[in-house]
Amino acid sequence: MKTVSDWIHSCSKEQSTTYKEWFNSADSDGDGRISGNDATTFFSLSNLSRSQLKQVWAIADAKRQGFLGFQEFVIAMQLVALAQAGYDINSDIFNAEIDKENIKSPVMEGLDALIAKTKSLHSQPDASGTAQPQLLSLNSWAAPKSAKKLSLSAVTSIIDGLKRLYMEKLKPLEVTYQFNDFVSPLLTNSDFDAKPMVMLLGQYSTGKTTFIKHLLRCDYPGAHIGPEPTTDRFVVVMSGPDERSIPGNTIAVDADMPFSGLTTFGGSFLSKFQCSQLPHPLLDEITFVDTPGVLSGEKQRTQRSYDFTGVISWFAAKCDLILLLFDPHKLDISDEFKRVIGALHGHDDKIRVVLNKADQIDTQQLMRVYGALMWSLGKVLNTPEVMRVYIG
């Protein structure tokens, strides 16, 4: 009996040669990396479920590069073989013991056709059978100078290219002029790889948590719903391998999470911050930020031991969409809520106003409520255009 770790790293020469041929077939652009559509197309040949393939990718891409080199590809193929043999693929798989005699090479349906197609593409001659030299144009002096082309191995995606530009060009400038000390922390890989975020803001019991629950069609860890102020902390709802809650102190120092900047708000805030993870197809594409309801009076300022508006402002800069939820029975915008909306200044293009629970009132009342809401918003949002209100 051998552990999975020993078995994976003792790949035979024959297997390595086979995997090299598979790797070249999967790497359609020839840049020595497998990512994006290449990975989706190739690994779908294994007929494993999406959740299994997601775990295979997460374990093989341990460095969080966003692509697989040849060594990572070999690890991925060995994990595929284990999954096809009935083993559960998780983060503890390397410590499991296996009988290597019962583990066969991974079965990839339709792989032979893919290899044949790749070979035919690389061996196609010109129509005349000879290479055609490029003819120089007589008026080539008038042609615009072409930019120097990057090699195919330079970048594999837009995110990869932006990341490289930031690390090589912008980050040294930010460090030199101490931009991170005065404006915002330096960006990390997790900031580039993070999914789009949607933040929900509103006074207590306006339906923020219910809104997320309705979209997911299921409960998530840390969701509390009631007529009283139930959500007492910032909850980030994101994709994960299983249902679990992670404390704020942990995710703020996790290099794979884009929340390291929240450490500046201190331990009192981090104790009121958590991450809820669960496997869900919607959360594979988007992340939700559920916020505590804005209280009125001194409770908002004195009973919260952290800078609430500062935290809102930080999330507003990170989020791609901000939903302001209003209850038709609580339309008054308190001074505290006005201060919170003021923290969104500079991100007006992200704000969407939602009049929630509109099904609880009739049409005539809805018209009155709509007018009252527009009047209240006119005193808070300093925009010349009329704010569009979505009815929910």
Image (spheres, grey):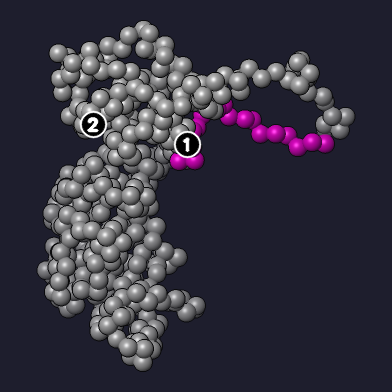
Q: Quadrant of residue 389?
A: bottom left
Q: Specify few, some or many for label 1: CA neighbours under 10 Å numbering under 14, 14-19, or 20 or more.
A: few
Q: Earlier in the sequence, mark 1 or mark 2?
A: 1
What residue is at 60 percent from the left and 20 percent from the top? 120
Residue for badge 2: 89
Task: For mark 2, give the secondary structure.
Answer: loop
What residue is at 42 percent from the left and 64 percent from the top? 350
Q: Which amino acid type is marked by label 1?
A: Asn
| Quadrant location, the N terminus | top left
Classified by dominant secondary structure, the portion drawn in magenta counts as: loop
Q: Position of residue 190 (x, y in %)?
A: 33, 41
Q: Position of residue 334 (x, y in %)?
A: 25, 80
Q: Quadrant of residue 40?
A: top left
Q: Position of residue 71 (x, y in %)?
A: 36, 19
- The image's mark for residue 37 is 1
223 relative to 176 in the view: left or right: left
Task: For mark 1, give the secondary structure.
Answer: helix
Decide whether residue 51 is among the magenta residues.
no
Relative depth, front residue between 355 and 48: 48
Highlighted range, magenta:
142-161
**Can the viewer see residue 58?**
no
